[in-house]
Image: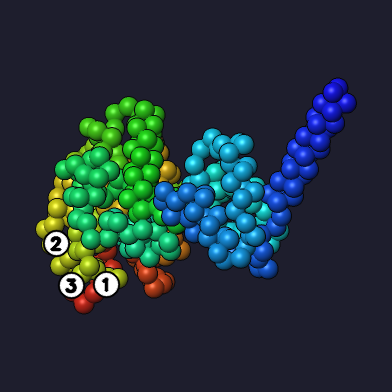
Amino acid sequence: MKKILVLGLTLSLATLVALAFWLYQQLHEPLKIDEPQILEVSQGRSFISLLNQFEQDGWINSTLPMRLWLRISPPEKPIRAGEYELEPGTHLLGLHQQLMQGDVITYRLTLLEGWTFREMRQALARAEKLEPLTQDWSEEEIMEAVGMPDQPAEGWFFPDTYTYFKGMRDLDLLRLANRKMKGLLDQVWETRQAGLPYDSPYEALIMASIIERETGAPFEREDIAGVFVRRLQKGMRLQTDPTVIYGMGERYQGRITRSDLREPTPWNTYVISGLPPTPIAMPGEGALRASVNPADGDTLYFVARGDGTHQFSRTLQEHNQAVREFQRNRREGYRSWPAAPMDVEAEETEETE
């Protein structure tokens, strides 16, 4: 009797070992694919339904081994939706881990510093594999969806490179960019200098957007900010071309004239005093930090050299001289600030400050 019991246990153990070896082999058997494949997993789809698809497509011989494994070792979390790249040699157990980890194919979208809200939305609409949920939404609907109802959208989204995967919505990226901008603005506001002519972080955001549009040279941002801050403190108008351009909207075609400078819009700082009512673009971190930590000095003017940098001046006389000097050899795309006589098209002009 004892021998029979030992024999039975031995046979059972041998069977279990053989079953375990067979199961291991089946789970590590490479899928029958000869080249990389893109697997799309929709939201809410189960791994069992994928197994059935693999069997129908001839990628596996049977769903039984993986079904047994899932009963023996139930997964701790469901598989994640998205696109997955399967290489030849991929086996079922490894694929299941890949799907649970969410190791999906990702895409990148860069929102550039200085873009307007309209330009950002155009970039989102062009983004590959990004669901255009908000494509037909109004600005008000978008701001309500990101948790800022009744707030203008301009300036409230941080320019950066964002990673996403198929199945994500443009609203997801908008919320992410909005949270990043709000967080960074709160952070830099805590580092602000004393005595700035701002009553709120929002006014610093407005100033940062003007700085962002005024110079592409990072080392100039604090100097530009210093000029603007001193002008506000002295009660001088900012007189900055980017605010005029923003107020012109789609009418702007690369040049502004004297009549444009005189046109009353809410953003035209040649006409209005103080800051415009909203930002005019998406400022980056450098411009945000410059807006609250401007450079010390006594300059009140600057003019474009034509190479992307500016000549700063203390007096209007110095500024006019610099304007004449750099306009003599101005290149295409040249801008001066404030507007100078030769910097407007086909109209008689006068010097402004």
Q: Nearer the viewer, mark 3 or mark 2?
A: 2
Residue at the limit of the structure toward the right, as seen here = 3
Across and down, in percent, residue 22 comes to 74, 47
Q: Secondary structure at mark 1?
A: loop
Instruction: Identify the amino acid type marked 2.
Output: Arg
Q: Quadrant of residue 324?
A: bottom left
Q: Nearer the viewer, residue 157 or 202?
A: 157
Quarter the C terminus occupies:
bottom left
> Mark 1 is on which residue type?
Gln
> Could you tell me which residue is drawn at 62 percent across and 56 percent down?
62
Callout 3: 10 Å neighbours few (<14), some, many (20+)?
A: few
Mark closest to the chain's N terminus, 2 or 1: 1
**Measuring 42% from the left and 43% from the top, which residue is drawn there?**
285
- Total of numbered circles in the picture? 3
Location of residue 27 with respect to 325 vertically, above or below:
above
Q: Which residue corresponds to mark 3?
A: 348
Residue at the spot of label 1: 253
Q: Which residue is label 2 attached to?
A: 262
